[in-house]
Amino acid sequence: MSAGTARTARRRRGNPAIDGTSVLNALSSAVVVVDADNHVISLNMAGEDLIGASAAHAAGRPLSDWIPDDSPLTSMVEQARVTQSSLSDYDLVIESPKLGQRTVNVQISPIPETAGCVAISLQERSIAFKMHRQLSYRGAARSVTAMASMLAHEVKNPLSGIRGAAQLLEQSVSAEDATLTQLICDETDRICALVDRMEVFSDERPIQRGPVNIHEVLERCRRIAQNGFGRHVTFVERYDPSLPPVLGNRDLLVQVFLNLIKNACEAVPGDGGEITLTTSYRHGMRVAVPGSRERLHLPLQVAVQDNGPGISEDLRANLFEPFVTTKINGSGLGLAFVAKTVADHGGVIEVDSAARRTTFRLTFPITDEPKPRRVRRRAGVEEESVP
């Protein structure tokens, strides 16, 4: 036996046995296997995340529960089954009430060993696209930061001089002209308030973070909305009560979700307006940190969905830029603040919009699980120790 053959044999003997399920669960692509009647046989963990159901719950149910029969994907499955050949498509849009609107790359292959069975691999195109958007959102936040620093130093001082001059003029003008000097003071105060709002972007200090119950934050925001600007809205809550705490700043998270809920309340129709708040756990959601080999685990997702008219295509690309707004009296700083705060939390924000369905999805890191404590007995005395 040669030295190379011996080394290969040793490596084979030392490798642990790996089953197919473990390999499938390690993939970021959703893999769904259906039988000849398009009923789900199995799916991996990414597939569970995609359809929002466990493998045990999905087994035996028709694929049409998640993907309509008239979807191009269903036609591709049937074509692969009939021709016994693999098919693929890119940037395919699949849409259903349960899945929402997803853009995916699809690979479909028949399983020769089992008649009629087909394996479907779905890779959301949005993974790389999301990271590109996150960098754009952070760039938008940084541009606001620079502008806020400049305005704080270069604008507020002249404004205070203008206001003081207007107050002096007010003492020597007629009652009719006094309204004009008061207008100068009021507008100066309004500009100062806008600059004060922007100064939050110039604070580059790390935020103080700790365990935060995200459901308490959402419940507080919902109560504020229903007792004020959201009286006309029906709120639907779909929470996963088993979620661990978010690693974040409670006050900042309240501001983030108040911004999103207020925007949603203003977007929905006056009659029949509905906002859905959803929390869920996403297995395997990891993102790379720019300039580092570290990969952050972002498993906790919160979604704010409304049934408004949607965000126009030309506005969507610049949605988180400062001063971008469709509101008549809006400042365009709310979503810029949301982008900065989510980035400061090490999180990711995504937007999907279509007619009567706009969804903001935010994913956050969670706090570390507490280490279990062991109790040891020594001479009748119990001592706690942390492994």
Image: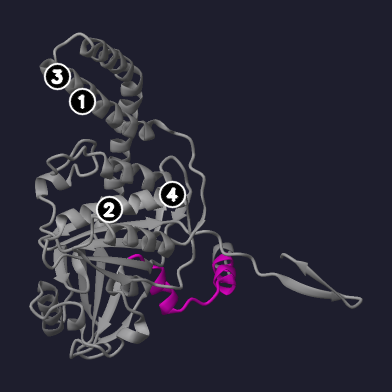
Residue under the point 28% across and 90% down: 60
The residue at which mark 4 appears reads as 251
Mark closer to the chain start, 1 or 2: 1
**First of labels 1, 4 by sequence position:** 1
Disc 2 secondary structure class: helix
Q: Amino acid at mark 1?
A: Glu
Q: Is residue 253 left or right of residue 211?
A: left
Q: Main secondary structure of the magenta part?
A: helix
- Regarding residue 346, the answer to whether it shows in the image is no
Residue sitting farthest toward the front: 175
Looking at marks 3 and 2 on the same chain, the residue that comes earlier in the sequence is marked by 3
Q: Does residue 176 appear left or right of residue 231 in this picture? A: left
Q: Nearer the viewer, mark 1 or mark 2?
A: 1
* Residue that mark 1 sits on: 187
Residue 14 at x, y percent in the picture: 59, 71
Q: Are marks 2 and 4 in contact (CB under 8 Å)?
A: no
Q: Are marks 1 and 2 in contact (CB under 8 Å)?
A: no
Q: Position of residue 308 (x, y in %)?
A: 13, 60
Q: Which residue is mark 3?
A: 180
Question: Which residue is denoted by mark 2 in the rendering?
Answer: 260
Q: Element at badge 3?
A: helix
The residue sitting at 36% across, 31% down in the picture is: 199
